[in-house]
Amino acid sequence: MTFVPKDVVFLPESTAAFPDRWVAMNVFARTAFGLSGEIFRLLGTLESDPAAGGDGPFRCWRVEYFSNEDGLLADPSRYRRAPEDWQELSLDRSALIAELKKHCILIDDEVAYRERFKPKRNLLDRERFGNFHQQHGQHMALTRRKDPADWWMRQKFTADQLSVRSDTLYGAIQSKFLERYTQERIGAGTLVVDLGCGTGVYSNLMASRGASVLGIDPNEAYLTVARTNAAPGTRFETMNIGQAGALDRIPTASADIVFMSDALLFYFVPFYPGQAADIGVLLKDIRRILKPGGSFVSLEPHGAFYLMPWLGAVDRPFVVVTEYLNKTFGIVPPLSQLIREVTQAGFAVTDMREIVPADYFENVDPRGHHFASEFPLWHLFEFRSLADPA
Ligand SMILES: C[S@@+](CC[C@H](N)C(=O)[O-])C[C@H]1O[C@@H](n2cnc3c(N)ncnc32)[C@H](O)[C@@H]1O
C-alpha cells in the first residue's frame, strides 16, 4: 500500500502571482516537493481510493535544493522560497507517484523507510539519510567537488580571512557577541588557550583585548592561514585534541581561560564516522591546563534548534524540531549530556548565555534574523574548574 508517512507536513505557498502551490515537506528526511491543489487532494484520498484523481497530467514543481551549500548557517529548510525559482513539471500519474516516492512524500513500506534513518555506509550511499556531516560531505564531494576545508573558510570568513562575514549568521551572532564578550572578559595579560582555533580569527580578537593566546588545532590548512594572519600576542601550534598525550606540551596551570568555539560538538558527533575523539581526555586536559579557578569558555551551536527546518512567513518563525534527545541527523548534544560530561570532569557551570543576532541583520536576511531572534543558534557556557578534591 502506498501512503503519506506521518513525517510529512503541507505548507500553502501560493501568492497572487503564483496561485495554487503547496510544498510537501518530509521534515525528518528533509525532502520537499511542490504540488498543485489537485495533487494535494489526490494524496488525501489515495489510501481509500488508489485510483482517485485520474491520470493527469499534474502540475508540480521541483523546489528542493541543498540550502546549506550557501553556508552552514543558511536556511536549513532545503526548499526554494521564491516561487519564481520553482521548476515546473507536468507529469502523468505514474511519473508523479515516482517523484513523490523519491522525495519521501509517499512510501510503500514503513519498515524499509525507517531503516533509511541510519548513518550512511559510505560517501556514495544515497539510500540512508545519515547525519548532517555525512549529507554535507556527500554533497561537497559528489555534487560540488569542493574541498570542505576551503569551502568552510569561504562560507564563514571574508576573502582576506581576517574577519567573519557580516552577511552570515556567524557574523551577526557569533562574531558580534564575541566582540562584546571579549571586552567584558579579557584584559591585558589574560592567558588564553584557544582549542580548535581553526584559522585563528577569534584568537586574534582575544589578543586585540590584551590577551596572550595559544591557538591549537589539528588541521594544518587552517593553521597556515592562522600563522599568516597572526596578531601580536598569538602563537599557533599543531596538536590533536581529545587524544591521550596530545596536549602534553602545554604546561599545567598555565591558562586563565581555555576557549573553544564550534569545536566541542565534534566530541559528541564526530566529523568523520568512526573517528571519535574522547571528550573525557579533552576535559581532563582542559582542567590540567587551567590555573586553579580558571574558566573553560565554550561557544557552541545551541542544543535544541540547530539545523531544523524554519517554516512560516518571513516574520513568523516556526521550527519543526524533529529530534532532541535521540539524534540521527543532529550534530550537537542535548544540554543534559553536555552538562553531565563537563560537571563529571570537575567543572561547575558559572554562566550561560543564549545568543541572538545583532539588529543590523534584519536588513541582510529578515527570515534568518526573525528565526534566530526567537531560537538562539549558539550558546555560551562558562565552566569553572573546581579545586581537585584529592
Ligand atoms: C568549525 S571549526 C571552528 C574553528 C574556530 N574555533 C572558529 O570558531 O572559527 C572546528 C575546528 O575544530 C578542530 N577540531 C578539533 N578537534 C576536532 C575533532 N575531534 N573533530 C573535528 N574537528 C576538530 C578543527 O580542525 C577545526 O579547526
Image: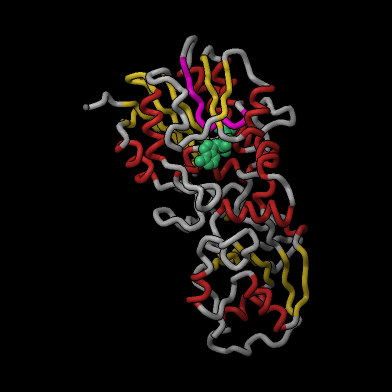
The image shows residue 333 at horizontal and vertical percentages of: 43, 47
Residue 194 in magenta? Answer: yes
**Would you place residue 48 above or below residue 257 in this image?**
below
**Would you place residue 48 above or below residue 384 in this image?**
below
> How many marks can you see?
0
Residue drawn 55% across the image and 59% down it: 130
**In which of the image's four quarters is ligand 1 placed?**
top right
Q: Nearer the viewer, residue 92 or 346?
A: 346
Q: Nearer the viewer, residue 319 or 142?
A: 142
Residue drawn 73% across the image and 61% down it: 16
The image shows residue 323 at horizontal and vertical percentages of: 45, 57
The image shows residue 206 at horizontal and vertical percentages of: 54, 19
Which quadrant of the figure has residue 29? Answer: bottom right
Q: Report if residue 195 is visible in the image.
A: yes
- The stretch of residues the image draws in magenta is 191-199
Residue 325 in magenta? Answer: no
Q: Report if residue 373 is visible in the image.
A: no
Q: Nearer the viewer, residue 3 or 244?
A: 244
The image shows residue 273 at horizontal and vertical percentages of: 52, 53
Residue drawn 72% across the image and 80% down it: 95
- Asked whether, in this view, residue 198 is left or right of residue 354, the answer is right
Quadrant location of the N terminus in the rendered image: bottom right
Q: Nearer the viewer, residue 364 or 187?
A: 187
